[in-house]
Amino acid sequence: MQAIKTRANELALLGKLIDDEDLIDRVLEGLSDEYKSVIDAINVRDMSISFAKLHEKLFNKEASLQIAQPSPLSLPAMENPTAFRNSPNWRPPTTTPQQPDPTTAFSPHDQCQPKPYLGHCQACGTQGHHPSIPLQPRANHVVLGNNTTPTWLLDSGVSHHVTSDLINLSLHNSYQGSNDIMIGDGPALPITHIGSTTIPTSSRTFTLQKVFCVTSMQKNLISIYQFCTNNHVFVAFSPSAFRVKDLNTGLILLMGEPKDGVNEWPTTFPFVTSSPLLAFSSVKTTSSEWHSRLGHPSFTIMKNIVSKFSLPLSSLLSSSTHCNA
């Protein structure tokens, strides 16, 4: 059929147009008796079938014939079902007469479900895909075989997060930039992908954005600068531990301990207890007490200090309350 369609297109370029009905008649004339059910179904139609629809039905019929007559030397379904008729040694295979194929039945009362196309698409090579039907996009996802958490190291010397395994990224794309990763004075390491991931803890789920995938890396690195910027936190270090704290409240969100000289992100997340919040009561002070605390300034200076720093006074400021010191 592809050869016939190609020849028709060539004739159309030369000004000789061939309509679909002539093409369909030419194809039906070249079919063997095995396709009689398809031919009969097309001939009894009230409306003519399109060339693309005929193409699809012949594909389905050819696939059903292969299922009905399995053979270790059987050829895969081809896009051109009449290709072998040009060979002088070609003979139609002898098979037991088949019932009308459900894929070619046009009766509105037929309740049989059509069989799927099992051949290979000559456009993309996908089995079961017909060239006239667009492929649906597939989600790129990875299923982990276990619940192990990858090991991440906190590093203040890297500008971006780096992982050595693409499976650590929940979302990723191929890296189109020209940058490489430099480790000390070593060679440049190529970046294959860029993506993002999340790290859940008992207090909060942290986000790692713009993570570079470098397969030749040995460790997964967290850029402290990027981590603090994207999650609104800061990291406090001590010789025995590090703490991730909320930037606004100062509450401890995560605690970890250094291992072998590096700060490794903990794999277990116990609940962190912070110091209880303290409430202070504010009692206004008299102007004479402020005058004494501030070193006995003059009334003019005292008035400016109270106004500038909004000092709480229990009574109005008066020059009579000031001494002459």
Image: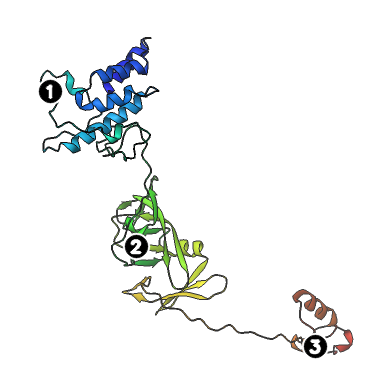
Q: Is residue 41 above or below residue 267?
A: above
Circle on res. 78: none
- The picture quadrant where one finds residue 97 is top left
* Marks 3, 1: nearer the viewer: 1
Q: Residue furthest right?
A: 320
Residue bearing the label numbered 2 = 220
Q: Which residue is mark 3?
A: 286
Q: Amino acid at mark 2?
A: Asn
Foreground residue, 244 or 270?
A: 270
Task: State the image coordinates of residue 261 (x, y, percent, origin top left).
Answer: 33, 73
Q: As shown in the figure, which amino acid type bears the numbered disc 3?
A: Thr
Secondary structure beneath disc 1?
A: loop
Q: Rounded to the nearest whole Å, what is the CA distance between mark 3 and mark 2?
A: 60 Å
Q: Measured along the vertical axis of the image, is residue 14 above or below residue 6? A: above
The crowding category of the residue bearing disc 2, from other C-alpha atoms within 10 Å (few below 14, some 14 to 19, many at least 20), is many
Residue 233 makes an appearance in the image: yes
Count all numbered tags in the image, as a single digit: 3
